[in-house]
């Protein structure tokens, strides 16, 4: 019997890490005018929110094969749409695509809805300083499956499932030097609530379950980006420094470097 079509993305998502949603955070403020639509595709090294070790299972050691998920960052991409609905208000929606280990093409794992409120607009020449305050609500989730052989030679499936809800608040400060060039600095705060559970399915039919209940994870950082405009096409390389922790008991706080590149089209 053929597998249903939706089984393929579910199977691919089983190889993904749980990423942060950040597309569009560092795109220049003040660029869009009422009625403009901006569509962008971003590729980034984004922060991983949780991994198998974060459940803190003392009586059930984490298999060494899970090291591929025990990383601080993960290559991911985002599809972002921003619509300038009013002179000082833009609405945005984002689809989070994260790259499995194999095969190497993006799989949807979540998204966000948000806004940008323009606090300071560009001057009549469309150059100078612009400031926008952003906000977005985020939801992402992945499953990580690991078929393996136990020490007694039996087969077992380990499954880690993660769900994350959160909010992000960036302040976007941009200076447009000239029509085709702008620079952006963006401090940001993120707050996520993460729930995770680990299930095991043994060959003899026995099962086990370990849960990590909703746990808050806070982070703060600074993003820096440049934007080059080629007519309606905008190319924006950037990098963020983020002071962040992971879910789970006793997780250390670390400084993470997150480079990225965004290519957008304005309509």
Image: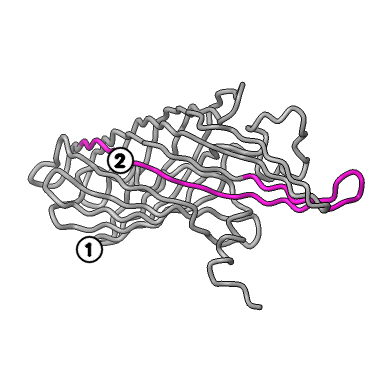
Q: Quadrant of the C terminus?
A: bottom left
Crowding at label 1, few (<14), some or many (≥20) Cα neighbours within 10 Å? Answer: few
* Residue hosting label 2: 183
Q: Which residue does the numbered mark 1 point to in the structure image?
A: 267
Please state if 149 lies on the left or on the right of 188 as rendered.
right
Residue 133, relative to residue 106: is it above or below? above
Quick check: 257 above or below 178?
above
Horizontal side of residue 196 vs 229, given as left or right: right
Bin the neighbour count of mark 2 within 10 Å (Cα to Cα): few under 14, some 14-19, many 20 and up. many
Give the image quarter of residue 48. top right
Residue at the image position 53 percent from the left and 67 percent from the top: 6
Quarter holding the N terminus is: bottom right
Q: The magenta stretch spans which residues?
A: 131-160
**Is label 2 in contact with label 1 (beta carbons under 8 Å)?**
no
As drawn, the residue found furthest toward the left would be 124
Residue 93 location (% of width, % of height): 32, 52
Q: Is residue 81 left or right of residue 52?
A: left
Query: Which residue occupies 62% across, 54% down?
Result: 14
Residue 177 image position (x, y, % from top left):
23, 42
**Position of 147 relative to 183 (above/below):** below
Dot 1: what SS?
loop
* Camera-side residue of 104 and 151: 151
């Amino acid at each position: 019997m053929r597998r249903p079509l939706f089984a393929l993305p579910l199977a691919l998502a089983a190889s993904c890490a749980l990423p942060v949603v950040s597309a569009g955070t560092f795109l220049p403020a003040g660029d869009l005018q009422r009625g403009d639509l901006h569509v962008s595709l971003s590729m980034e090294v984004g922060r991983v929110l949780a991994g198998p070790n974060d459940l803190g299972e003392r009586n059930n050691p984490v298999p060494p094969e899970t090291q591929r998920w025990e990383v601080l960052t993960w290559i991911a991409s985002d599809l972002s749409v921003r619509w300038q609905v009013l002179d000082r208000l833009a609405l945005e929606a984002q689809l989070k695509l994260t790259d499995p280990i194999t095969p190497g093409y993006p799989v949807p794992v979540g998204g966000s809805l948000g806004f940008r409120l323009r606090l300071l607009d560009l001057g009549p020449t469309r150059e100078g300083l612009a400031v926008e305050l952003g906000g977005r609500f985020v939801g992402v989730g992945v499953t990580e499956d690991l078929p393996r052989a136990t020490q007694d030679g039996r087969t077992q499936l380990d499954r880690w499932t993660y769900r994350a809800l959160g909010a992000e608040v960036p302040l976007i400060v941009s200076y447009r030097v000239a029509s085709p060039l702008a620079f952006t600095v963006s401090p940001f705060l993120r707050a996520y609530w993460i729930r995770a559970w680990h299930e095991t399915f043994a060959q003899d039919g026995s099962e086990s379950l370990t849960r990590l209940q909703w746990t808050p994870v806070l982070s703060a950082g600074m993003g820096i980006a440049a934007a080059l405009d080629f007519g309606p096409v905008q190319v924006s390389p950037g990098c963020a420094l983020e002071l962040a922790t992971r879910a789970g008991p006793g997780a250390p706080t670390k400084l993470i470097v997150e480079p990225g590149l965004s290519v957008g089209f304005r309509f």
